[in-house]
Image: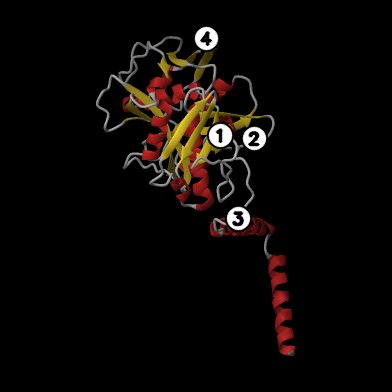
């Protein structure tokens, strides 16, 4: 009996000495990591019938912090990636966005995610004006020092960075005060650029009548760098005979092209039962197969964001209501479909 007490005493004494001698910096690294691993294990191991806090999904930034989107290039050189940047409030947010587009991701973001800027690093923003829906962006001559084969991506990164602002409907690119007649890769410069250019453009394989088309902006998932998942917009040119909201959702359910490097968390077999637009609200009703998603809480969030981002890209849509077999429900891991989602409350690929 005395031997057992002795062993317990020395074991407790040993543990105390370890914690006294271990550097504080190590504790600061070890303890948070243990908590993260514990929470991860709890999330991954939680069965669907275990009650979890249900709350509306939204991204909240501190007061005095603004956000804007820029479009970087992915590590595999296939897609422009919208990234939301959080920064201290400043006047001239459009110019701030262009400057960040040129500067590119931070070294840590480039290393972790494989993101890069497509604009030549010596480019300078000489001016930006927005009047009556037209944004005129004036750059230094260094802007033209890109590889002509990357011209579409260079132009699109500027155009869609500026089109995020509600006051901008079209974009004109100038070089030291003059609009180029033609860019180095052959793109005409004298006409302004609009959303109809399409971001990450692709054409549906079955499209035959190019005179009757419409563009569906679809959001798919892309695992980059250390397997962090980004949401990628793809503009798919499709036949024009279908109702537009239904066509968009049916293309989303079809999923990304093979060999695109993208994936969808929406389960195979999911069908669209009904879709309706009421003012700025769109209501999408899916079959019960949509609940067969995998990946626990991460899969649930990816599925949710794919649908909301895709539907909020439809003009005039500001709120999204998702139904399953006609009912507004709470999902097993805490995301609620009970109320319409304000699309502007979800930021795309937020990096701080």
Q: Quadrant of residue 48?
A: bottom right
Asked if residue 111 can be seen in this view, the reply is no
Tell me how the rendering is colored.
secondary structure
- The residue drawn where x is 36% and y is 27% is 242
Q: Secondary structure at mark 4?
A: loop
Residue 347, image x, y percentages: 56, 34
Residue 302, image x, y percentages: 49, 43
Which quadrant holds the C terminus? top right
- The residue drawn where x is 74% and y is 80% is 9
Q: Find the distance from the CA under tag 1 to the CA under tag 3.
A: 24 Å
**Residues tagged 1 and 3 counted as in contact (Cβ below 8 A):** no
Q: Find the distance from the CA under tag 3 to the CA under tag 2.
A: 22 Å
Rendered view: 1 above or below 95: below
Which quadrant holds the N terminus? bottom right
Q: Find the distance from the CA under tag 2 to the CA under tag 1.
A: 10 Å
Label 1 sits on residue: 347
Q: Find the distance from the CA under tag 3 to the CA under tag 4.
A: 50 Å
Q: Find the distance from the CA under tag 2 to the CA under tag 4.
A: 30 Å
Label 3 sits on residue: 36
Rendered view: 163 above or below 84: above
**Residues tagged 1 and 4 counted as in contact (Cβ below 8 A):** no
Residue 53, image x, y percentages: 64, 49
Label 4 sits on residue: 132
**Residues tagged 2 and 4 counted as in contact (Cβ below 8 A):** no
Q: Secondary structure at mark 2?
A: loop
Q: Which numbered mark, 1 or 3, is in the foreground of this view?
A: 1
**Residues tagged 2 and 1 counted as in contact (Cβ below 8 A):** yes
Mark with earlier residue (1, 3): 3
Q: Find the distance from the CA under tag 1 to the CA under tag 4.
A: 27 Å
Which residue sits furthest left? 208
């Amino acid at each position: 009996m005395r031997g057992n007490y002795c062993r317990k005493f020395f074991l407790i004494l040993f543990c105390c000495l370890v914690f006294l001698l271990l550097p504080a910096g190590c504790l600061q690294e070890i303890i948070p990591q243990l908590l993260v691993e514990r929470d991860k294990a709890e999330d991954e191991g939680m069965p669907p019938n275990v009650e979890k806090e249900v709350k509306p999904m939204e991204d909240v930034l501190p007061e005095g912090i603004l956000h804007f989107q820029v479009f970087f290039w992915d590590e595999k050189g296939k897609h422009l990636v919208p990234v939301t940047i959080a920064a201290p409030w400043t006047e001239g947010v459009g110019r701030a966005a262009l400057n960040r587009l040129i500067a590119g991701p931070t070294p840590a973001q480039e290393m972790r995610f494989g993101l890069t800027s497509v604009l030549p690093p010596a480019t300078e923003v000489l001016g930006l004006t927005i009047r009556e829906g037209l944004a005129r962006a004036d750059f230094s001559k260094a802007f033209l020092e890109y590889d002509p084969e990357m011209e579409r991506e260079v132009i699109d990164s500027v155009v869609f960075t500026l089109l995020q602002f509600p006051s901008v409907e079209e974009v004109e690119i100038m070089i030291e005060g003059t609009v180029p007649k033609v860019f180095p890769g052959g793109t005409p410069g004298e006409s302004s650029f609009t959303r109809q250019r399409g971001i990450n453009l692709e054409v549906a394989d079955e499209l035959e009548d190019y005179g009757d088309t419409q563009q569906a902006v679809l959001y798919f998932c892309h695992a980059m760098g250390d397997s962090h998942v980004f949401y990628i917009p793809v503009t798919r040119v499709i036949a024009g005979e279908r109702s537009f909201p239904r066509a968009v959702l049916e293309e989303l359910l079809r999923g990304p092209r093979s060999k695109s490097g993208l994936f969808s968390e929406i389960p195979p077999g999911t069908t669209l039962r009904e879709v309706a637009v009421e003012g700025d609200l769109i209501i999408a009703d899916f079959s019960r197969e949509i609940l067969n998603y995998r990946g626990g809480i991460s899969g649930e969030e990816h599925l949710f964001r794919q649908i909301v981002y895709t539907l909020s890209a439809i003009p005039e849509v500001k709120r999204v209501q998702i139904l399953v077999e006609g009912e507004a429900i709470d999902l097993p891991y805490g995301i609620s479909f009970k109320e319409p989602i304000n699309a502007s409350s979800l930021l795309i690929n937020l990096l701080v």
